[in-house]
Image: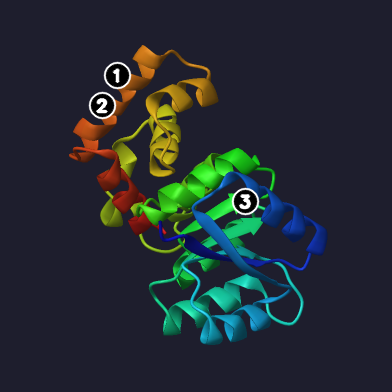
């Protein structure tokens, strides 16, 4: 079995070492290539090695994660990068995703969920923490409705058709959550989730979750 080559980039050495140990022990398909303490070293590493996936911190000395993502993706667009951060600032999230990151997860994610996210990312699924996705989509909606940037009604007319609850479910769908997970996350019944998802599909004229993710990327 060909293992996924993974690079860890984080200036918190203890966090990175702990993550390396866990992934080595519980993600058999992953090979940890190394640990870099900042974005510059990560860029240099990529030039001599070829990781498949990078777990990248956002705030680091010398070169932060957002700048590193832009540089790495410019030369190696096939490398997938997940941002791992303690913070969920809108600007950092937007900048990282626009620069080419394939996901943005908070560091309080459980190691098990992180492994699931890595596997899903390798299958082409964008990975964003549900709380970040909701905040990003809701802030984008408010920003555009208030006149900041393009008019949401003209640019994304489908978005204005969703109720507040449907936008929450849309955000969770965009992170790859299934109906059971959405039910638990929002504290509503599975049947209610199924009904709402069907309504969202109908309103947005999509047929599956992949098309939901594509629409979410357009909001960015």
Local SS, label 2 = helix
Where residue 191 sits: x, y (%)? 35, 13
Residue pointed to by mark 2: 199
Q: Quadrant of residue 58?
A: bottom right
Residue drawn at x 29%, y 36% as measured from the top left: 161
User: On the rendered structure, is 96 left or right of 21?
Assistant: left
Local SS, label 1 = helix
Q: Quadrant of the image for the N terminus?
A: bottom left
Residue drawn at x 70%, y 53% as measured from the top left: 21
Tell me whether circle 1 and circle 2 mark residues in contact (CB < 8 Å).
yes
Local SS, label 3 = helix
Residue drawn at x 58%, y 60% as measured from the top left: 83
148 or 139, which lies in front?
Answer: 139
Where residue 213 sits: x, y (%)? 34, 48
- Disc 2 vs disc 3: which is toward the camera? 3
Where residue 78 sits: x, y (%)? 38, 72
Tell me whether circle 2 and circle 3 mark residues in contact (CB < 8 Å).
no
- Disc 1 vs disc 3: which is toward the camera? 3
Give the distance between the C-alpha atoms of the residues marked 1 and 2, in whole angstroms.
6 Å
Number of numbered markers: 3
Tell me whether circle 1 and circle 3 mark residues in contact (CB < 8 Å).
no
* Lower position in the chain sequence, tag 2 or tag 3: 3
Give the distance between the C-alpha atoms of the residues marked 2 and 3, in whole angstroms.
39 Å
User: On the rendered structure, is 141 left or right of 205?
Assistant: right
Residue pointed to by mark 3: 23
* Lower position in the chain sequence, tag 1 or tag 3: 3
């Amino acid at each position: 079995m060909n293992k996924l080559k993974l690079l860890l980039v984080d200036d918190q050495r203890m966090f990175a070492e702990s993550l390396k140990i866990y992934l080595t022990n519980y993600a058999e398909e992953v090979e940890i290539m190394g640990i870099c303490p900042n974005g510059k070293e990560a860029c240099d590493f990529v030039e001599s090695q070829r990781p498949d996936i990078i777990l990248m911190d956002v705030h680091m000395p010398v070169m932060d994660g957002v700048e590193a993502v832009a540089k790495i993706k410019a030369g190696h667009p096939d490398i997938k990068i997940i941002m791992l951060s303690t913070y969920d600032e809108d600007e950092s999230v937007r900048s990282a995703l626009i620069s080419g990151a394939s996901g943005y997860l908070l560091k309080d994610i459980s190691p098990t969920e992180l492994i699931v996210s890595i596997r899903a990312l390798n299958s082409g699924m964008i990975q964003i923490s549900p709380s970040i996705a909701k905040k990003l989509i809701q802030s984008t909606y408010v920003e555009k409705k208030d006149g900041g940037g393009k008019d949401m009604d003209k640019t994304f007319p489908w978005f204005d058709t969703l109720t507040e609850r449907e936008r929450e479910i849309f955000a969770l769908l965009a992170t790859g959550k299934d109906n059971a997970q959405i039910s638990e996350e929002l504290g509503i019944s599975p049947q209610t989730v199924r009904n709402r998802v069907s309504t969202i599909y109908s309103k947005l004229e999509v047929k599956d979750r992949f098309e939901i993710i594509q629409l979410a990327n357009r909001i960015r």
